[in-house]
Amino acid sequence: MVKQKTLKDSFELKGKGLHTGLNVTARFCPAEINFGYKIQRTDIEGQPVLDCDASLVGDTQRGTVIVSGDIKISTIEHAMAALLAMGVDNCLIQLDGPEMPILDGSSLYFVNSIKKVNLVEQDAEKQYFVVDKRIEVEGEYGEKMVIEPYDGFAIDATIAFDSPNLSHQDARLHDLEEFEGEFASARTFVFVRDVEPLVQMGLIKGGDLDNAIVIYEREMPQDRFDRLADSLGLAHQDASQLGYLNHKPLTWPNECARHKLLDIIGDLALVGKPIKGKVTAFKPGHTINNKFARAILSNK
């Protein structure tokens, strides 16, 4: 019998939120059997606790946001992916702000912290969501997610963008044991053409070249490029030089596809149990991921 596991000890991670820019601290704590994943907003009166549940996702614009009344907790997917992939079944996260810290834009810090404190077995059997029939959902822009019966958990993901730098990429996970070495450090990414509207919406206040891969593939006038850099607190660069703006090179040629696969794991963690099934994803993103997770829940 495979038993449930929780953290052997607590750990803290501190950093700024990607969209709010606020400095926040997330404390990951052991939890009792059948607790699942929950987040407590310690900065709010009464310190409310929200379930990390796909049915509570209220926004998927540039991350996964769980909502209960006026309470929101944003950008939870990287932490959720780490917890699920590293075998943590029960965990309480105490958060002193409205958003998880973005750190380096991947799941690596979460994974390393889990490994440092280690896990402990609990006196209860690990529960799975076993897929017994094909489930398929589609999005309005050609997105498609499918899950089929499979004795394990695997994902085939394909991303496709209207960009010469990032048209099609594939990533494949055959087993969650691959996550730590092959996917955990894959960083989130953004196109420069999408940065301006995000800034105008008051988002990515904490975004920089250290926590996201920034792809510049459509030349803009130098003065406009400079103003955009100023709004993000970045150094000016030559607007005629297209490509990746980061000083740190890509870890893998398909790092962007690997990150999208990481996001799938994080968003499917909100089903509430590890899944046994094989996922095939075309053009995944938080919106279609959540629609997919809800469809799986409805087939319980």
Image (cartoon, rainbow, N blue to C red):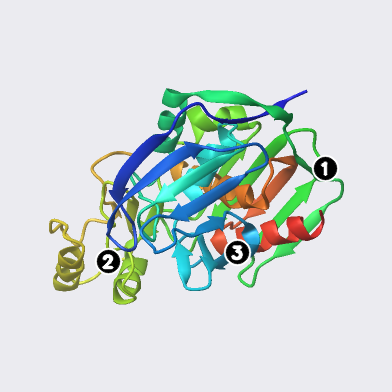
**Number of numbered tags placed on the structure image:** 3
Viewed as shown, does residue 203 lie left or right of 269?
left
Q: Is residue 33 visible?
A: yes
Where does residue 250 sit, x and y in percent of width and height? 36, 39
Image point 54% across, 33% down: which residue? 179
Q: Residue at x 44, y 58 (%)?
A: 47
Question: For the point 45% across and 40% down, which residue is it?
Answer: 28
Residue on which the image places disc 3? 56
How far apart are the alpha carbons under marks 1 and 2? 46 Å
Amino acid at circle 2: Glu
Image coordinates of residue 284 in percent, x first then y, are 59, 56
Quarter of the rendering occupied by the N terminus: top right
Q: Say whether residue 252 is visible.
A: no
Q: Position of residue 253 (x, y in %)?
A: 43, 39
Calculate the distance from the C-alpha at mark 1 to the C-alpha at mark 3: 26 Å
Disc marking residue 149: 1
Quarter of the image holding residue 288?
Answer: bottom right
Q: Earlier in the sequence, mark 1 or mark 2?
A: 1
Q: Which residue is mark 2?
A: 219
Question: Residue 66: percent from the left, percent from the top?
Answer: 53, 62
